[in-house]
Amino acid sequence: MSRIMSGIQPTGSLHIGNYLGALLNWVRLQEEYECYFSIVDLHALTARPEPQELRLAVRELAIGVLASGVDPERAVLFVQSQVPEHSELAWVFSCMTQMGDLNRMTQFKDKSQFQADNINAGLFTYPVLQAADILIYRADRVPVGEDQVQHLELAREIVRRFNGIYGQTFPEPIVVPAKAPRVMGLDGESKMSKSRGNEIGLFEEPEETMKKLRGAKTDPQRLRRNDPGRPEICNVFSYHGYFSDAATCEQIAADCRSASIGCVDCKQSLAGNLEKVKGPIRERAQELRANQGAIDEILNEGGNRARAVAKETMDLVRERVGL
Ligand code: AQP
């Protein structure tokens, strides 16, 4: 049976990009595969969060993942730092990784621009730890958004090098593509991202979402209500594709082209359809927040199950490399 591994950083509140690009896939895959889903708090350290905030973010993220439909009876949900073998394997892998390969990683370039005052080594070697996250479970499939595909290529390269030197040990993991691999941010310029302030939060109240949508860029040529619009290049219309049914999308597109509706009408319709997805998730999250003990139990149990597999892999790696 194929094994799935994927992670998500506790760096801020979940947004619809994470939901469409990762969580929806997780919920689907847990029905078919053995799944390991991790809250990757070691990765979050690269942005140097306040300790207390990091702990809260881990818990809130666990709630968000569960509220989105991940079932701890089917999938193993755990916190990365509770399984020390991730870091141990990352060190072994870092000795297999060439600087030239790391230098090509575009996420490092993006993130270094974004946190120019803290370009730390962890940010640079982030994909090595990510490779260890996957391969400590010898996972062969990884559901991620488009932003992570280059990192997966590097993980495959690391596997080839390791297996070439020490003998067949790890599978070459492949990407399980998301239906929405790159959800754009409200600015329409870069991917939706927790740390860029261009996101629609998964837990947002409808009023807040509508407020953000009001300010969101649409077709720049549509200056007046009577100007015909071009839905095919409109970022807000692209969200309809994720949240509105086919008939609604068709109708909105036609009405936009003929200027029978304005951008505000289009945004209102979107906000209503977004709420149909976000509302139930927000409610489930609220119920989960009321039972923090249960969250701890789920994460502890997930950590125990993850550690058992990780230890097996690390024992094998130690033997192979001569430790
Ligand atoms: N905009 C997006 N469209 C599709 N998928 C996305 N993912 C993130 N943004 C989008 C996918 O969500 C998963 C978890 O990502 P992450 O939180 O670990 O890190 P990230 O990719 O760096 O996400 P953010 O929101 O951009 O976080 P920050 O701002 O903290 O860096 C991954 O599978 C990712 O592909």
Image (cartoon, rainbow, N blue to C red):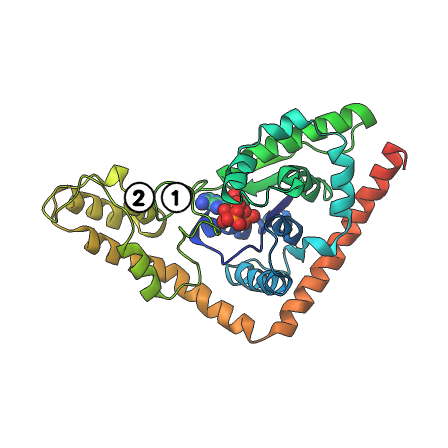
Question: Is there CB contact under 8 Å for labels 1 and 2?
Answer: yes
The answer to whether any part of residue 1 appears in the image is no
Residue lying at the far left in this picture: please name it: 226
Residue denoted by label 1: 184
Residue lying at the far bottom in this picture: please name it: 290
Few, some or many residues within 10 Å of mark 2 (<14, 14–19, 20+) = many
Q: Would residue 287 be found to the left or right of residue 267 on screen?
A: right
In the image, residue 100 above or below residue 79:
above
Picture coordinates of residue 44, whole percent (x, y):
61, 51
Residue at image position (55%, 58%) is 65
Q: Would residue 206 be found to the left or right of residue 130 on screen?
A: left
- Check disc 1 and report its element: helix, strand or loop: loop
- Check disc 2 and report its element: helix, strand or loop: helix
The answer to whether any part of residue 80 appears in the image is yes
Residue at image position (66%, 40%) is 121
Picture coordinates of residue 64, whole percent (x, y):
53, 61
Q: Nearer the viewer, residue 13 or 3?
A: 13
In the rendered image, which quarter is residue 99 located in? top right
Question: Looking at numbered disc 2 in the image, what kind of residue is underneath it?
Answer: Asn
| Residue 235: image tag | 2
Picture coordinates of residue 185, whole percent (x, y):
39, 46
In the rendered image, which quarter is residue 294 located in? bottom right
